[in-house]
Amino acid sequence: MTPSIFDKKETMKRKTLSRYLIEQQREHNNLPADLRLLIEVAARACKHISHAVSKGSLGEVIGSAGSENIQGEIQKKLDILSNEILIEANEWGGHLAGLASEEMEHIYEIPNRFPKGEYLLIYDPLDGSSNIDINVSIGTIFSVLKKTEPVEGEITPVTEQDFLQKGANQVAAGYAIYGPQTQLVLTTGYGVQIFTLDPEIGSWVLTQDQVKIPESTSEYAINSSYQRFWHAPIQRYIDELIAGKDGPRGKDFNMRWVAAMVAEVHRILTRGGIFLYPTNSRESHRTGRLRLLYEANPMAMIIEQAGGAATNGHIRMLDVQPSSLHERVAVFLGSKEEVEIVTQYHREAI
Ligand code: AFP
């Protein structure tokens, strides 16, 4: 008899995150115990954040915290709570040399009462905060680097400089998206996996392995309210998409904008598309809105591992050399064909 879609045995056959990580280590020897612990602990923290987010007003966590973060942005209560959850979940484990967060100006050194490890965790604890009060998808984005030591075997105190590594150095990257389902998207350098939180057993369950982004697309995501401030390459690229099948692209395009990068990237992983957050002439003092270390780089690793592309308009995102912890960058990522076109338009404009 064909098992019912609700047949519990089907759920039990799926791999949990823990099993997936152990089997990855056996196959690729790329996930030593401390890195597996880091990923499991970060994933458990995301379950905790998901629970807090889902309570909304019932949990008295909606609304502003009445403070600003280093970015000068008003912090939501959930921004601060999510940041604290990730710190408390990770600081004791002995796997981290330090961590950094969108919500904290400086790096967080592991307290001396805990052992230190060799990994660096950088995250945006709650991406898309402006969506919290309207019950639209938000998420947590994280990036993992290794602290390099000048002398092998000698542990030196962690500094901000340790975090300023190119995205190509990431050993893992992922995000959780708190939407109709809570899902965890992860890459450790061997493709992209999607885990869905099974609320009945409280486990992350592998629901998609080796995610692949279609090379071409007819869907783009950009905040069009800045159109009058866009520089020429973006004006040209978007004008051609809007011209549709009567224009140079010869096909019609659809537009989406959720105002949460995790949701845009998740849609692109699911059905293709291109996400664009360019610099603009109104905020010429800023090199974009999105942050390189804990938004652009982890998402770029995920997108590339799924067969897509990610640039800052000129070079591969993962090759950009960071110069500061909260550095901003223009972001173009998604289906390879479209990213190549918009990046070419930027190069031609120089
Ligand atoms: P918030 O976390 O402040 O809501 O910002 C979200 C974000 O960093 C990114 O997730 C979105 O893609 C982008 O900003 C939305 O920007 P706009 O507010 O300009 O639409």
Image: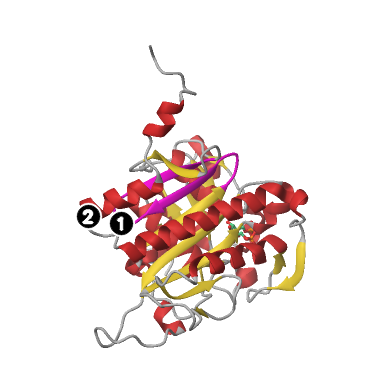
Q: CA distance from mark 2 to mark 1?
A: 10 Å
Residue 189 badge: 1
The type of residue carrying mark 2 is His
Residue depicted at 26% across the width and 60% down the height: 30
- Neighbourhood count class around disc 2 (C-alpha, 10 Å): few under 14, some 14–19, many 20 upward: few
Q: Is residue 306 above or below residue 227?
A: above
Question: On screen, 57 above or below 37?
Answer: above
Picture quarter with the N terminus? top left
Magenta stretch prevailing secondary structure? strand
The mark that comes first in sequence, 2 or 1, is: 2
Rendered residue at 37%/42% (across/down)? 211
Observer-nearest residue: 265 or 277?
Answer: 265
How many C-alpha atoms fall within 10 Å of the one at disc 1: few (<14), some, or many (≥20)? some
- Rendering coords of residue 124 (x, y %): 55, 64
Q: Give the number of the disc on residue 28.
A: 2
> Which of the pair 193/203 is nearer the observer?
203
Q: Residue 188: x, y in percent?
A: 33, 57
User: Could you say whether the residue bearing mark 1 is in a helix, strand or loop?
Assistant: loop
| Whether residue 60 is visible | yes
Q: Is residue 35 left or right of residue 259?
A: left
- Is residue 193 one of those drawn in magenta? yes
Residue in view at x 47 percent, y 39 percent: 218
